[in-house]
Structures are given as structure tokens and as C-alpha cells.
Amino acid sequence: MNITRIYINKYFYIPALLLLTLVTFTSCEEKIDKSLLTGEPKLVIHGLITDQEGPYFVRITRSSTDLTQKFNLEQELAVSREFEAINNAQVTISDDQGNVDSLQFWDVDLTQDGGLGEWVDQGLYSTTHIQGVAGRTYTLTVTHEGQVYQAVATIPTEPPTIDEVKYTKSQDKLNDSRVPLISFEEPQQQKNYYRFFYLPYTVDPITNELYLIGGYSEGPNNFWQLISSQIFVFDDQLLPHKVIDLKLEDESVFNQELASPQFIPNTKLEVQIHSISKAYYEYSSSIVENRLFSPKKPFSSAPASPPTNISNGGLGFFGASSVKSILADGPQN
């Protein structure tokens, strides 16, 4: 696909606040664990490697035990924490074939060309040459202030092919928006876990080039999958062999949905299906549960923080996935 990633915030409904908070990924979304509110701040590491063409990204922050109280739009008491970006760590990713890549601090300014996200000074690191391959095992190593943190992830075998993309009305009552319905055949003879992700484009009527819209500024392919709040994950135990019209809708506070059709002529949607590990699925599921956690009583029944595969007391997760994608027409009605 010939895709030019340029910000055009005109056709798709994604709240501006979401774009400002995307870069925090799960940091401000974590379930509130009382044990994390005392003691020393912890390093929070998020990384993702896929079998798509690189580069791949890792984000490193440090949690804070300082709490701030603020009221949301419904005047409900909420609790949030600030997180410090770590920009001076040494980061490597190696594979089981002996390949080693030293990641570079990513100081790209995506506000150029009208982009909304400035990712400078956000604790982001980018690979330079390593390539993700299904079946290979990868080790992420982060060294910071004399401490070493590691995580290991294996890229699963490729997921099934998406056969069809349709659309249905969203549960969003404030906007006449649409969400995707996905159909595919799920292999029943093996255990699988899936994550779905989608990116919207408008099509230039003259050149047929694709331009990212809906608040997605220019950036490498694997970047948005790491930081996006789109977390549509499924255990195949609940999926039949022929999956028909699986609905991809975020029921949490923030939604990423396709706006009313009269505002989106000549659009395309790239839908990705990721094959992920059980551990990555459980981590992602815990984030979804946390986003649905009521802010009215933030300490009433908060479970432990999301599971992690980061060693040495670190938080976050290093994930791996194999990916297939389909480019479908946008909603027509």
C-alpha cells in the first residue's frame, strides 16, 4: 500500500484529549494498587515488536507516588498520577539468532505537517535494524541508574486472514458514529489470542494516495500500535470457527470510532489482526478492565496492578505479535 501518514483531523471522531493522552498508553490507565502509592517510584517499560517491517519502539517512564485529585467532566472525584519520561537509558533488543540492536533515543517532532503529537522528551526509543520474525524469541534489556531490567517475548505464528469488514452504529449516544465488524475463520485446532487494531485514511481522488486521518500524525507503522488506547483483545475459547461480524468497539471513556458517514467520503480503513501470547492478552485485558473501573470509589476494590514481564521490579510489558492486515472501504451509510 502506498500510504502517506499526514494529520488531517476532519473526518473521524476522536476526542482531542485522547490524542494528548495516547502517549501515556497505560501509565495513567493503571488500576490503582495501594502498594504502589507508597515507597519508591518504579520504572515503567512498554515495548512492542512485530513481524512487520521495523522500526519498533520502547517507551520508558518512572512512576510517581504523588497523587493529584481532579474532577472529570461529570464532577466525579478521580485520581491521577504523573509520570516522568526517562530519556537517558541504554536499551537493546536481541533475538535468539544472535542479532543485537542498540535502540536510539527517538527525538522526532511529529508536529511538522500539522501533526498533533510532539514525541520529543517522551522517553521513546527506536530500533535501528533488527527485524521481527514469527517464531523467534526477543529479549529487551534496559539499563538505567545502575539497574538492569529485562523482558522476553516470542512472536507467535501468523494470525488468520480477515475476510470481510463491515460497519455498525456505535453505542456512542452523542455522535452518529460507526464501528467495524470483522469476519474471519479461526483455526480451532490450536490455542490463539488476538488483538485488533485499525487506522483510518482518506484517499486522494487524483493520486489515490492514502492519508492518515482522525488525529494520527505522521509516524512509523509500529508506533501507533504501541501507544494507542485501542485494545481489542480476544481469547479464541470464545470464538467459533467462522467468526462473523466481531464488533470492535471501545466501551471505556475514550473511543476511537468512525464518524457519521456524511463527513467521511472516499475513505479507507486498515484493519490489523495480531496474534499475541497469553501473557500479552492477560496484560491487555487487565488494562481494559482498569479503564472500565469506576472513578467514584478509586480505592474501594482496586485489584493489583496489571501483570508484567519486566524483571527487577519494573512495571509495564514487552509484547510481541505477528500481523496480517486488510485495507477496506470505509462505511457507506
Image (spheres, rainbow, N blue to C red):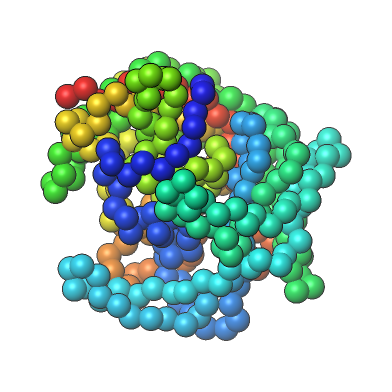
Say which of 117 and 38 sits in front: 117
Relative to 187, 39 lies left or right: right
Q: Is residue 156 above or below residue 311?
A: above
Say which of 93 and 16 sits in front: 16
Residue 222 seen in the figure: no
Q: Residue at x 62, y 48 (%)?
A: 57
Q: Residue extending furthest right?
A: 98
Q: Is residue 103 above or below residue 300?
A: above
Identify the image quadrant of residue 184. top left
Residue 205 position in % (x across, y down):
34, 20
Relative to 296, 182 lies left or right: right
Q: Is residue 107 above or below residue 201?
A: below
Q: Residue at x 17, y 31 (%)?
A: 262
Residue 27 position in % (x across, y down):
48, 63
Identify the image quadrant of residue 91. bottom right
Residue 70 position in % (x across, y down):
30, 77
Q: Residue at x 67, y 49 (%)?
A: 126
Q: How many marks?
A: 0
Relative to 9, 101 lies left or right: right
Say which of 278 and 101 sits in front: 101
Relative to 227, 174 lies left or right: left
Q: Is residue 37 above or below residue 101?
A: below
Residue 95 seen in the figure: yes
Q: Quadrant of the C terminus?
A: top left
Q: Residue at x 67, y 29 (%)?
A: 134
